[in-house]
Structure formats: structure tokens, C-alpha cells
Image: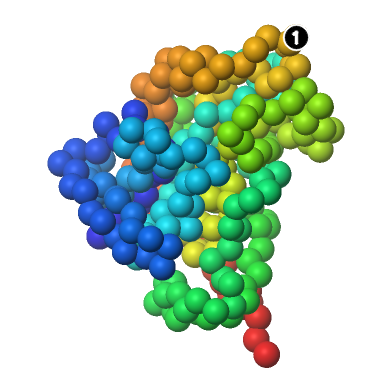
């Protein structure tokens, strides 16, 4: 049974050895999960945009993906993201492990708990209204520490901390939006980090992400046109480092979780 899940792009999939595809049926549709090995650890992998990158950010089955991992017994999720920089000093190619997020999406489903659907989470049957806390740590501190330590062991510079602003997409942001995000305290901007992180917390799954800065956001460095080709090119140039960090981080994760994520549902379920 895999304890660790990875959600990311197709390049990360190459980490898995002897993987098999499994279709997991969830209340949110069927989800294809690839289960294989990273070293001595069994790992479940989900390509967020599909195997051929055909699913746009707003259409990703965020609930289905996380619930499928929950059904498999996954306790920790390492994600990867391509992001734009909201700061002049965060250059394209920078690796960053964010420590907070601002959700600016508009049309996504943000919770599992609609008050009607009965869900099985960590051996509990939950049906009702649930209010999880995103403090004291928005992202799992144990996964974050493992990613940062792995980067250091690889001799790579990985920025510790930053606020991830999640925009709706599919278009890139306007210069005015970017100015607003900067005023709000954002450091990087992407389209897939939310509601993924919060949904993981609702299932008591530890979650953190390793992000690659692929471009300056609109207006940060003049009025240069942004293209998806630029994003792909920079992310591809860093994929080896991303894989190396993930590979080295997995053995650094404690066998027993002592982070607040595991107790996210304690005191969170509303009762009549």
C-alpha cells in the first residue's frame, strides 16, 4: 500500500519503477493512478493534466485525484508546480518550496464536505459540514523540510518559503492583477495549487509542493508577451533537479507523522 503520492507533470512519472496503472472509482469519477516504486518506497503518481497534458487547470479533477489517493492509503503528497514570479529577484529557473497560499480561483469546487456526501477518511465515516484549519502550517512542515534538505544534499539552491497565488486560468494574468497580487503579499503565481492543497488537508493528507519559476509574471519585466512554450522550456530545463530532489526527499520523511496535518479533522466536524 503506497504511503506517498506524487501529483505533477509527466516528467516526474519517470521516477517510478515497475509501475502499473490502476483505475480508482471515487464519488467524483474514475481516476487513473500509477503505482510503482521510488527506491524502496511504494509510491502512487497522478499526472495532474493527464498523460498527454490535455486537462486545463480549471478542469482538473482535484477532488477525485485526492480522494483516490486517500482510498489507496496515501498519507503524504508531494506536488510539483510551474509558477510565474511576482518578484524581480525570483528569476526563471528558481526552485521554491512555498509556505502559504492565496486562492484567487473563482469556479472550482473547494471542499469535499457538502453536507450530503458520506466519505471515508482515515477509518472514519464523515458526513456533514467540516471546517479544517490551515494553521499553524498551510503546507506540511515535514514534507517541506524533506524537500529543502534534499535540495541542500544535492547542492541545489531551493528557496525556503513564499506565498503562492493561485489564479483561475487558462489565460495568463493581466499586469493589473499581478500588481494586486504583489500588494496582497504574493511571491509566485500559478494555476493548479488550489484547491489541491486545501483538499488534501480536508482528508488529513500531508501536502507540500516543489515549484519551478518558469517566467516573470505580466509587467514584472516590461511588457514582454508570455507564452506556454516559454513555461515548458524552463520547466523542462529543471526537471532533472526536480526529480533528484523528490527522489532524495522520500527517504528523509519520518515513518511516523508528527505534523498537524494528520489531526486536521479533530475538532473540525460541525455537530448539531
Front residue of this view, candidates 208 and 237: 237
Residue drawn at 68 percent across, 57 percent down: 135
The residue lying at 81 percent from left, 27 percent from top is 176
Q: In the rendered picture of this protein, how many numbered marks are placed on residues?
A: 1
Which corner quadrant of the image does residue 113 belong to? bottom right
Q: Is residue 207 visible?
A: no
Residue at the extreme bottom: 272
Q: Is residue 271 left or right of residue 181?
A: left
User: According to the image, what is the colour scheme of the structure?
Assistant: rainbow
Answer above or below: position of 211 versus 253: above
Residue at 34%, 28% (x, y): give it. 11
Along the viewing direction, whichever of 200 and 136 lies nearer the viewer: 200
Considering the image in quadrants, where does the N terminus appear?
bottom left
Tell which residue pokes out farthest to the left in this image.
18
User: On the image, numbered disc 1 is attached to which residue?
Assistant: 222
In the image, is residue 213 above or below residue 16?
above
Where residue 169 sits: x, y (%)?
Answer: 61, 36
Quarter of the image for residue 111 reads bottom right
The x and y percentages for residue 244 are 36, 27
As drawn, is 185 to the left or to the right of 81?
right
Q: Position of residue 181 (x, y in %)?
A: 77, 34
Label 1: few (<14), some (14–19) or many (≥20) C-alpha neighbours in 10 Å? few
In the structure shown, which secondary structural element does the residue marked by tag 1 occupy?
A: loop
- Does 179 sit left or right of 63 as displayed? right
Toward the viewer: 93 or 253?
A: 93
Q: Quadrant of the C terminus?
A: bottom right
Q: Nearer the viewer, residue 187 or 195?
A: 195
Amino acid at each position: 500500500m503506497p504511503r506517498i503520492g506524487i501529483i505533477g507533470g509527466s516528467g516526474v512519472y519517470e521516477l517510478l519503477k515497475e509501475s502499473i496503472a490502476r483505475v480508482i472509482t471515487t464519488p467524483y469519477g474514475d481516476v487513473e493512478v500509477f503505482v510503482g516504486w521510488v527506491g524502496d518506497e511504494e509510491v502512487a503518481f497522478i499526472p495532474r493534466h493527464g498523460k498527454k497534458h490535455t486537462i486545463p487547470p480549471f478542469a482538473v479533477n482535484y477532488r477525485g485525484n485526492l480522494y483516490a489517493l486517500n482510498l489507496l492509503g496515501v498519507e503524504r503528497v508531494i506536488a510539483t508546480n510551474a509558477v510565474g514570479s511576482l518578484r524581480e529577484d525570483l528569476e526563471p529557473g528558481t526552485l521554491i518550496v512555498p509556505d502559504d497560499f492565496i486562492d484567487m480561483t473563482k469556479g472550482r469546487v473547494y471542499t469535499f464536505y457538502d453536507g450530503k456526501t458520506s466519505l471515508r477518511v482515515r477509518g472514519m465515516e464523515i458526513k456533514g459540514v467540516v471546517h479544517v484549519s490551515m494553521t499553524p502550517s498551510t503546507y506540511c512542515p515535514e514534507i517541506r523540510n524533506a524537500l529543502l534538505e534534499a535540495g541542500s544534499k544535492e547542492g541545489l539552491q531551493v528557496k525556503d518559503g513564499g506565498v503562492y497565488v493561485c489564479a483561475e486560468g487558462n489565460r495568463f494574468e493581466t499586469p493589473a492583477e499581478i500588481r494586486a497580487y504583489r500588494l496582497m503579499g504574493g511571491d509566485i503565481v500559478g494555476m493548479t495549487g488550489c484547491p489541491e492543497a486545501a483538499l488534501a488537508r480536508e482528508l488529513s493528507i500531508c501536502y507540500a509542493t516543489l515549484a519551478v519559476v518558469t517566467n516573470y509574471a505580466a509587467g514584472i519585466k516590461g511588457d514582454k508577451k508570455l507564452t506556454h512554450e516559454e513555461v515548458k522550456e524552463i520547466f523542462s530545463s529543471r526537471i532533472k533537479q526536480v526529480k533528484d530532489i523528490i527522489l532524495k526527499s522520500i527517504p528523509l520523511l519520518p515513518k511516523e507523522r508528527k505534523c498537524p496535518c494528520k489531526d486536521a479533522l479533530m475538532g473540525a466536524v460541525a455537530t448539531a
